[in-house]
Amino acid sequence: MTTTTDVLISGAGPTGLFLALWLTRLGVRVRVADLKSGPVQETRAIAVQARTLEYYDQLGLGADAMRRGRHFDRLNLFVRGDLRGAVRLRGVGDDLTPHPYLYILTQDQNEELLVEHLTALGVSIDWNTEVTAFTQDDAGVTATFSRNDQHEIVRASYAAGCDGARSAVRHALGVPLSGGTYAQRFYVADITLRGKVREGDVNLSLDDDHFLAFFPMPEPHRHRVVGQLGPGVREHATFEDVRPELEANGLAQVSTVHWFSTYRVHHRVADHFRVHRAFILGDAAHVHTPVGGQGMNTGLGDAANLAWKLAQAVHGGGDEVLDTYEPERRPFAVALVNTTDRVFTGIVRDGAAARFLRLTAVPTLLPLLTRAEAVRRLLFLTVSQTRLHYPDSSLSQGAAGGVHGGERLPWVALPQGGSNFDALRSLTWQAHTYGPPAPDLLAWCARREVPLHVFPETRASRHAGLTPAAVYLVRPDGYVGLACATFDAAALDAYTDRWVRPATPRPHLPPRPSDLEVTV
Ligand SMILES: Cc1cc2nc3c(=O)[nH]c(=O)nc-3n(C[C@H](O)[C@H](O)[C@H](O)COP(=O)(O)OP(=O)(O)OC[C@H]3O[C@@H](n4cnc5c(N)ncnc54)[C@H](O)[C@@H]3O)c2cc1C
């Protein structure tokens, strides 16, 4: 049997599900296959960062996500069982994002949320289905979906390998996942506990020969703990092998173990994220340590970056835009793997100097450093992925005020309530002004069928770097494509001719000014 679709997706982890949802919202047909029988049951990744929540808002999942998870506000640092300091996490990004916090929404909760929203749009996942073969030619891609010895040939315009670190699509493309694997082994457990570990906070515990990180889970007294297995611990360790180090110094008294798993950590990035009509995203393209809770979020970011580009290509808008996926996402993945590698190596390194750093220098300096607003802000911007930008992309052009092409559109709360991010829910290219629009801009937007959003100039918009005379052409994923310091028809036309397309194909009707979406 052969069936056809627009985009076939191998893997229904968070990355594949999110890509499927975004594409479906843009009118692109998808087929999604996964080996599993349904969403993961284990928690795995636990935090969603502010940038992910912003994307969820764009797709209309934000409120639903906020009903399911919980915030955490503080990071406590224990050394040999004594509380040595605390870092307050709230309040530092209030002017940067509608979600100025770290948010616990575990991987199983994310997958359930995404599956529910896909189901509501009439998309069902091919569970218990393995992608067993993959080829491509000039006109499209072909995959075999295998289930219970039944084989279906699926033909599509494009393929997305969202099938994790052992990606079948990446293997079929012959793309290496270059990097290495740490020698150390680690464990992760979901546990219910009482003790010194503080409820609702992140708790780090440093000791002579081990470190522990406790993350609050949505349920009361439930925590995710991550630690390193000592050299003497047997290969198939159980929770009882690590219980003594958790319960030392009264740190925790564990009453229930919900899940326990051991694993090795890799630091690897695929040499390419695209080969012709096939793309790889998420863990299929990059794997790294869980430091900073970036793994799942980076996969979701890959999906947000690629979805609108694929939609433009599928809807006949040309495929030049697809060339920007790898140059935008791969450098970020490389930087992320290198940063998490440095932090991680510092935490797990052996020897007297490393122990001094871990047990004396860090506990003394960290609380002092993080009292400085600038340090806390940089930390938040980095971990939340709101600082991520694409300065070297061919999609990124111009500068106006403090905003450059390629930067995430700065978030601005509006005096009447809501924010400029509300406009992004249309998932379309759009023009923004922050002050009265230039007289010719209205006519230009009508002629080029670009929705225009006119926001008032306020202290908040100026503080965010948005200047009144400027025109910002904003991409469907919320990044500024072109920033023009003043209305410049030639620059806007040149950029629009090359990149800007409607989100879904429309019958070509002459635009009327009253069709314009103007938010004042
Ligand atoms: C124990 C553990 C703890 C973790 N903790 C954290 C954390 O604290 N923070 C964090 O950010 N990240 C964490 N991660 C990483 C996080 O889980 C991943 O980054 C995230 O799941 C990546 O999502 P993905 O959709 O790209 O890949 P995956 O979640 O791996 O999904 C890939 C999917 O593809 C399917 N698949 C594979 N091959 C095929 C095939 N041939 N055909 C069809 N389907 C296929 C698989 O069944 C799977 O469902 C953890 C991972 C593990 C295992």
Image: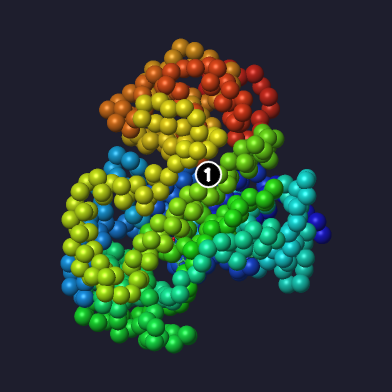
**In percent of the image, x 49 and y 53: which residue is there?**
333
How many marks on residues?
Answer: 1
Report the quarter where the C terminus lies.
top left
Visible residue check, residue 221 = no
Q: Looking at the picture, does residue 154 appear above or below residue 94?
A: below
Observer-nearest of 415 and 81? 81
Q: How far across and how far down the image is residue 427, in percent?
A: 53, 38
Q: How far across and how far down the image is residue 68, in percent?
A: 40, 58
Q: Residue furthest top?
A: 439
Residue 357's image quarter?
bottom left
Report the quarter where the N terminus lies.
bottom right
**In percent of the image, x 18 and y 63: which residue is there?**
364
Observer-nearest of 462 and 418? 462
Q: Residue furthest right?
A: 1
Q: Which residue is mark 1?
A: 328
Q: How far across and how far down the image is residue 198, in percent?
A: 23, 68
Q: Secondary structure at mark 1?
A: helix
Q: Is residue 78 left or right of residue 320?
A: left
